[in-house]
Amino acid sequence: MAALDCLAAGRAAATPSLLIDADSGAVLYEDHATQPWFPASLTKLMTVYVALKAVRDHRLAPDAPLLVTARASAMPPSKMGFRPGTYVPLDAALKILMVKSANDVAITVAEGVSGSVEAFATEMNAAAAELGMQQSHFVNPNGLPDPAHYSSARDFAILARALYATFPDQAGLFSIGAIEINGRIIANHNNLLGRYPGVDGMKTGFTCAAGFNVVASATQGGRRLIAVILGAPNVALRTIKAAALFDRGFAGIDRPSVALAALPLQGGAPPDEGNAICRNRSQTIAEFNAENERLIAPLEAASSQAFASPQGVALYDSSALSRVSAMATRITLVPPPSFEPVPIRIAGYPGAGPAEARGSSDSEAPPEAVSAYAATKDVSASAPLAPAKDALPLKGRSRAALRARSLEAKAALAHARLQAHTQVVSEEGDGKTAAPAPAKGKAAHLHRGATAAKVHSHAKQSAVKGSPAKRLSAKVLSAKGSSVKPHGGAAVAKAPAGAKKAAARDE
C-alpha cells in the first residue's frame, strides 16, 4: 500500500494542473504547472488567436474564403474531409476548429492567413513571445505530434486569458455546443459544457504522447476561473479533475497566491506519455484517481461542516459550497446535454443540398477574393464531368442487353455510311465506282472493291424489302463476329472480333 501511495504521489506530481482567476491572473492552485508538455489540439487555441489577430490588423476579412489545399486535405483525423479546391469562410473555419478540432481546417486557416504552415508557425511563436508564453514552441497549427512542438499549463492559462481579454466579442467561439454542417450535426468534445454550472469554454486535446488535455473556463457570480489539465488517462477522469478544481476555486478552498507570470519555470523536455496513456493505462488510472480523491476530500468535508480558523475567520465560503454542491463527485452522472447546433454552410461539402453543392455568389467567392496570402486554383478544372443524358446505368442491365445495344449502335453507323455512299452514286449517275468515305475502326465499312452498280442495286432492293437499318441490325446480332454480306455480295458491315471484350469493359 505504501508503495502504491508513493507511485500515486509521483504520478500526481508529474501531471500538470492549474487553476487561475481570469481577471487578476492570480494562481489559485497549481501542480507542476510549468512542466513542459505536448499540447495536442490545445494548439488550436493559438491558431485561433493568430487568426483573430490577423483580422484585427485588417489583413483579411472575418468571412474571407480560405482555400483547402492538397496539403490540408492530406491531414490525418480528426478532420472534416473537405476536398482540395473547396473554399471555407474564416469565421466558419474557426467554429469548426473549436467544436470538431479538425486538423485539415487548421492547415487551411494557417495557409490562408500566412501563406504556408511554416510562416504561420513563425507567427504563432511571435505571438507566444509577445504574450509571455516562455515555455512554448509551435511548428504546426493543429498540434499533431512533433518533438519540437510543446508548451505548459502555465502558458496555456496565459493564452486563455489573452483570448478573453483581447477578443471579448469572440468569446462565443469557445462555448459552441454543436455545429450543423449541411445536415450533419457535430458535438463539441468538451464534455464540461452543459454539465458543470457556468462552464463557457474552451478546448480539449489528445494524443498518446500528451494524454487527455483540457483548457476550461467557468463563470459563477461574475467571477471567471480558468483550469488547465494535462496528461489525464481518459476523458472521465479529466472531467472530474476539472470539476474538482472549479469546485475548490468557487468555494474558496483555494485562494489567490502568486501571479501566473511569476511561477518559477521548470526546464527539460516534455515527457512522452504514450506508454502510460495508450498501452499500460491501468496504473495511470489508479494514480490519477488518487489525485482526484485528494482534491475532492476538502469539498466533501466542507459540505458537512463549516470550517473556521482559531481566530474565527471562515476558511471556506459555505454559501459557495451550497451552490457548487461538489459537482466533482457526480459530474460524470450528468446526462449529455442537448445543444441547438450553430448552422454552417460550406459549398460543395459532401452532404450539401443542391444550392450549396452548386455554389453561389453568396456562399462561394471567386479565387481572387481569397486572402492575399492564399494561392488561387482553378476549381472547375478538377470538377467531375456530368454524365451523358443517354448513358447506360451500370446496374440493372444484363451483359446481353448491353452487347445488343452496342451492336445496334454499330449497325446504325453502318447504315448511315451506306446511305451516304448511295447518295454519291445517285448524284454521279455515271456507273463508275463510288469513292468510299474513310471508315474509322472496325464497326462498318464498304468493301473497297464494290462497284457503284452493286451499291445502287442493293439500295433499290433495300427500298423494296424494308428498312436497311432493321435488316442490317438483325444480321449483325446473328452474325457473332462474321462478315455480313447483303444482296450483291459486297461486304457491308463486320462486327469487330473484340466486341464482347469491349462490352465487358463498358460495364
Image (tube, rainbow, N blue to C red):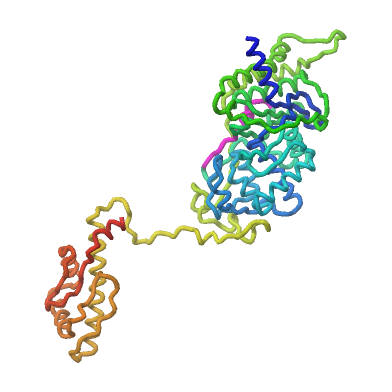
Residue 189 within the magenta-colored segment of the rendering:
yes
Q: Quadrant of the N terminus?
A: top right
Q: Magenta span covers which residues?
A: 184-197
**Left or right side of 442 for 272:** right
The x, y position of residue 367, in whole percent, is: 61, 60
The residue lying toward the viewer, choosing from 304 and 231, is 231
Q: Dividing the picture into quarters, in which one does residue 422 lie? A: bottom left
The x, y position of residue 183, in whole percent, is: 51, 43
The residue lying toward the viewer, choosing from 341 and 499, is 499
The x, y position of residue 381, in whole percent, is: 51, 62
Say if 393 sits above or below 422 in the image.
Answer: above
Name of the residue lying farthest toward the right: 311
Residue 270 appears in the figure? yes
Q: Quadrant of the C terminus?
A: bottom left
Q: Dividing the picture into quarters, in which one does residue 216 lie? A: top right
**Left or right side of 237 for 476:** left
